[in-house]
Structures are given as structure tokens and as C-alpha cells.
Amino acid sequence: MQREVTANLIPITASLREAMEQLNHGIGGVLFAVDSEGVMRGLLTDGDIRRALIGDKNLSSPVMESMNPDYRTGSVSDSHETNVARLNHTIRHLPILDEAGRPVSMIAWSDFWRLPVMQPTLGGNELAYVSDCIASNWVSSQGAYVTRFEEVFREHHGVEHALTVSNGTAALHLALVALGVGPGDEVIVPDLTFISPATMTLLSGATPVFADVDPVTWTLAPLDVEACITDRTRALIPVHLYGHPADMDPLLEIAKEHDLAVIEDCAEAFGALYKGRPVGSIGDIGTFSFFANKVITTGEGGMVTTNDDRLAAAMKKLRDHGMNPDRRYWHDVAGFNYRLTNMQAALGLAQMEQAEKFFNHRAAIVKAYDKGLRNIPGITLPPRKSWVRNIFWLYSIQVNDPFPLSRDELAVQLNAEGIDTRPLFPPLHGQPPFAHLPRREYPIANRLAAHGLSLPSSNSISVEDVTQVAERIRSFSEGAGQPQLSGLSS
């Protein structure tokens, strides 16, 4: 793949201000400086501009004084394969020149190499187990792998019951309905989270009430929970956000005082521990997601956990169309089809067999990120209280002053080099499904969401790739205190 380069061309006589404004239009983070004949004379990146401004240049200085004259090029006369071979981790943009030395196209490293934020790791018995399902014809929601997956998951969490479900959102809905949450009730949900806890509260007939999050853990703030409780409050849904457990003890005390149910949303926190206890084993019900980007995956899928026999029986019945377990096709209640297939459970069982390997590797990549990003001005590392094991589902940083790029600008720069990122979830209170709800102030959720950026965190990402991501972020900090790429005055 070769890119059009007209937007990447800049005269060598143009000013650094003009170069910065041109780079701000999302052209891949590189400019090709050309003379009056269109012949390439230099290459310019945002890093070159920042180094120039830190030195003795100013925004009016011409590009020719700061461009890099030592660059690698490709040729229209060479094969595409030959030109591509000239790219590497250091040379990320290759201008393709015609016979006169004029840039006519470009090959970018990011077109051939991308580092995703998260992707599944399927290196165990997944294929063998799924093939067994197909060979045996047990491909739907009945089969031995469903039972085996539930049992292994139950033992791993030290709970009495674990039931597979079709996805993590269904797990939340099932939990709310089994607890009897319905019209007229309120459920307290953190303002900073994925939307499912709030939408499933709505779909159960109840009203979500948003509480702000703690500035250190990013999870449900006990003091704000207290302020949200009314005589209609029926439940709390602490979300173990990005793999860091919520502070459960004070939340459980609040719940006990006000006779509230507690549903742990563990969608992002499989493997995390709160004071030595697995998340999902602490509240009345735990809910898990096994979407493809989670720590373990079944493609789609989820799990509910509980130590309450009554709740387990209610969720099992509701999951299976509300059918009486002792009388086929007799439905005691209006239920759902929230079952997991045997093939998906086969994937889940194979993933559980590798769980400790995943945890150990995640610890290694977190260590590499910590080492690479520590002490960069304006970069705040993810939360980690001493009383938890944060599983770091996504390694999420905060980007603030004096880092020279905004969160969004940093994301654009990394994307141009093939490094995927994603912003933190936008606060729920401002989203359209909840526009009819009363508004409160959510300063912590707003601040974290505006500055948070999640970096590649897959089970299979290499420590070398993590080190490169950290090095790229550190390289951008060289321009601290200098003008940024956006918001320039004319």
C-alpha cells in the first residue's frame, strides 16, 4: 500500500509555525521538505520541531534550518517489496521518489505493523476442544464443556455457584432480575464505566443513579455512594474498573446498613484480588465478561457467581427461559435465553488452563510499562492500592500538563506509528440514554475521562513492544513547555 503525499509536502522556506499547523491535520506525523522544483531536501516530524524550539529556533524560523537532511527514501524504479524492506522500527515513513527526486508517494510502517490495544491469545487447547465439540455434535448450550468450564471457574473463585451466560451484559441483567430489582427501584452505578450496568438497570425497569469515582482507585467512591442513597435504593454495582478492584469493605458496610444488594461487575477484572479474595466472590453476585478483548475469552460470553443458593437457582431458571427444572417446557416465570454454547465453553476451559500464565505475563508487561513511563512529567501511571492485585486489563495512564501533547494528540501520534490506543470511557451522566435523569456534579469522573488513555495490554504482547511504546511516549516529552501542535495563534 502506498499513500498519496500531496498533503505531506512543505516548502523548505515555510515557517515552523506553518509546519506545525500542517502536521495537525492528521497526515501521519511527517512532512517532506521540498525545494522550488519539488525535489525533496529534508524530512520533518513533530519531534524535529520540538527539538528546534527547545534550541535556538522560533516559530518563524524556516523549515530548512530544522529539517533532517539524513533520511532514507525509496524509488519508483524499485519493486514494492524492495521499498517495503527499507522500513523498520526506526524508519517508519519512506518517501518514494521519482527519477528527479520528487516525492510521489509514501509507504508507512503503520500500514504493515499494528499493535492492538487488546487481542485474544489462543495458544492452548482451544482448537482441540472446539474440534471435539464439532466431532461429537455437542455444539449448542448443552454439553460437557459447559459443566467443566463452570466447575473450574467456580473452584478458581472459591464460590458455591458459577453459571455461564451469553455475555457480560446479560450477566448484569440476570443478576438484577434475580435480585428482584424493578420499576420504582434505584441502583447506584459508578459514573465512569462501560455503559452496561446502567443500561441493564434501565432495562430491568429501575433507575440508575450515578455516583462519582475515587480519584485514586477510579472506582465507586463510598462517600459519594452515601450521598446517593434514598428510600428507593435497592442495589450497588461496584465496577472493578480496568482491572483494579473497588474498595469493597466500606461499600459492603454501606450496603449492610441500608439493606442493599451488591453486584460486582468483574467484566474487566478476571484474576484481580481484593485483600486476597478473588473479585466476584465478595458481593451477593459477581458478573464477568469473556468478550474477545478480555483477560480470558470465549469470543462472546460471561459468567455469574454467587454463594447464595436461592440466587443461583433463580438465575439458572431465568437464564433458561424461566423453565421449571423438573418439568420440561413448563415455564414458571418469563425468562431469557442467556445460555452459553458448548463450543464457547470449550474455549473458556482452554483459556482457564492458561490463566496463571496470562497473569504472570501481564505482570511482566506492567513492570516494563512502569519502568519505561516512570517519571515522565505529566504522565500518571495506573492506580494500584497495596491491598489489591490489579490485573491491569488495560494499562491506562493519565496525560496532563506539563506533557507537551494532549491525550488526544498523543493518541494520534501513536496511531500514526501503528500503536493503537483508546480513551477512557466517557462518563455515563452525559450520554443520551440518561438525559432524562437528574444531574449532579462528577468532577473526578470528568477529569479522569478527559485525560485517560489505555495502551496495548494483550496477554500476548511482547515486553519488547511494550518498551517501544513507552520509549515513543517518552520521546514526545522532549518538548515540555513548548507550543503544542494545536491551538496555535496566528
Image: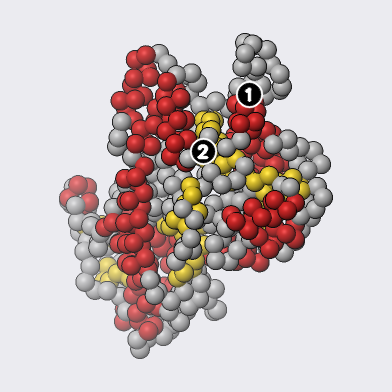
Q: Residues within 10 Å of mark 1 (few under 14, many from 20)?
A: many
Closer to the camera in the image, 441 or 225: 225
Residue drawn 34% across the image and 79% down it:
51
Q: Quadrant of residue 430?
A: bottom right
Hey, what amino acid is under mark 2? Val
Residue 66, horizontal then vertical, whole percent: 32, 79
Label 1, secondary structure: give it: helix
Label 2, secondary structure: give it: loop
Hey, what amino acid is under mark 1? Lys
Q: CA distance from mark 2 to mark 1?
A: 19 Å
Quickly name the residue at label 2.
159
Q: Quadrant of residue 473?
A: bottom left
Residue 219 falls left or right of residue 208: left
Residue 308, horizontal then vertical, whole percent: 61, 35
Q: Quadrant of residue 253?
A: bottom right
Image quadrant in which the C terminus is located: bottom right
Residue 324 falls left or right of residue 288: right
Q: Is residue 61 visible?
A: no
Residue 366, horizontal then vertical, whole percent: 36, 59
Q: Give the number of the disc on residue 317.
A: 1
Closer to the camera in the image, 237 or 487: 237
Residue drawn 23% across the image and 67% down it:
71
Residue drawn 47% across the image and 30% down it:
150
Residue drawn 46% across the image and 69% down it:
380
